[in-house]
C-alpha cells in the first residue's frame, strides 16, 4: 500500500511538472521567435543607419527620407539599440526557462 501511494504521488508530481513545462515550453517558443525577430530587425536597422550616415557624409547620393526625424542616423541607431536591448531581455528570459529545466529543443 505504501509503495503504491509513493508511485501515485510521483505520477502526480511528474504530471504537474509536465504541465508546467509544456506551458513554459510555449513561452520558450515565443521567446525564441522574439529573439530571432529582434536579430533581423537590429541588422536591418544597423544597415539603414549606415546608409543614412553615408548619405549625410556625402558618400552616397541620397537617402530616401530627406526630411523629418527619420532623416537623421542617430534616430536609426537609437531604435537599433532598443531592439538589441529587447533581444537581451528575451535571452535572459530564455535562460530563466532553461534553468527551470524546460526545453523545446537543444543544439
Image (cartoon, rainbow, N blue to C red):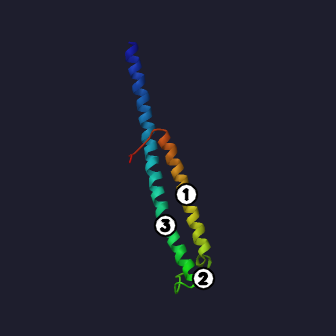
Mark 1 lies on a secondary structure that is helix
Residues at marks 2 and 1, CA–CA distance in whole angstroms = 28 Å
Residues at marks 3 and 1, CA–CA distance in whole angstroms = 13 Å
Q: Which residue is mark 3?
A: 43
Horizontally, residue 106 falls left or right of residue 51, namely left
Q: Which residue is mark 2?
A: 67
Please state, as top left, top right, bottom left or bottom right, where the N terminus lies in the image: top left
Mark 2 lies on a secondary structure that is loop
Query: Which residue is found at the position 48% from the left and 51% from the top?
Result: 31
Query: Which residue is found at the position 49% from the left and 40% from the top?
Result: 99
Residue 55, horizontal then vertical, whole percent: 55, 82
Q: Nearer the viewer, residue 29 or 8?
A: 29
Mark 3 lies on a secondary structure that is helix
Q: Of the two numbered discs 2 and 3 on the same chain, state the one appearing first in sequence.
A: 3
Decide: few, some or many residues near mark 2? Use Cα within 10 Å; few <14, some 14-19, many ≥20: few
Q: Which residue is mark 1?
A: 86
Residues at marks 2 and 3, CA–CA distance in whole angstroms = 23 Å
Amino acid at each position: 500500500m505504501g509503495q503504491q501511494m509513493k508511485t501515485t504521488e510521483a505520477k502526480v508530481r511528474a504530471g504537474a511538472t509536465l504541465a508546467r513545462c509544456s506551458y513554459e515550453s510555449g513561452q520558450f517558443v515565443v521567446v525564441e521567435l522574439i529573439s530571432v525577430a529582434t536579430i533581423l530587425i537590429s541588422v536591418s536597422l544597423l544597415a539603414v543607419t549606415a546608409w543614412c550616415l553615408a548619405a549625410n557624409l556625402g558618400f552616397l547620393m541620397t537617402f530616401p527620407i530627406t526630411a523629418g526625424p527619420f532623416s537623421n542616423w542617430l534616430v536609426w541607431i537609437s531604435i537599433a539599440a532598443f531592439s538589441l536591448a529587447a533581444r537581451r531581455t528575451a535571452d535572459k528570459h530564455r535562460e530563466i526557462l532553461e534553468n527551470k529545466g524546460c526545453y523545446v529543443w537543444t543544439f
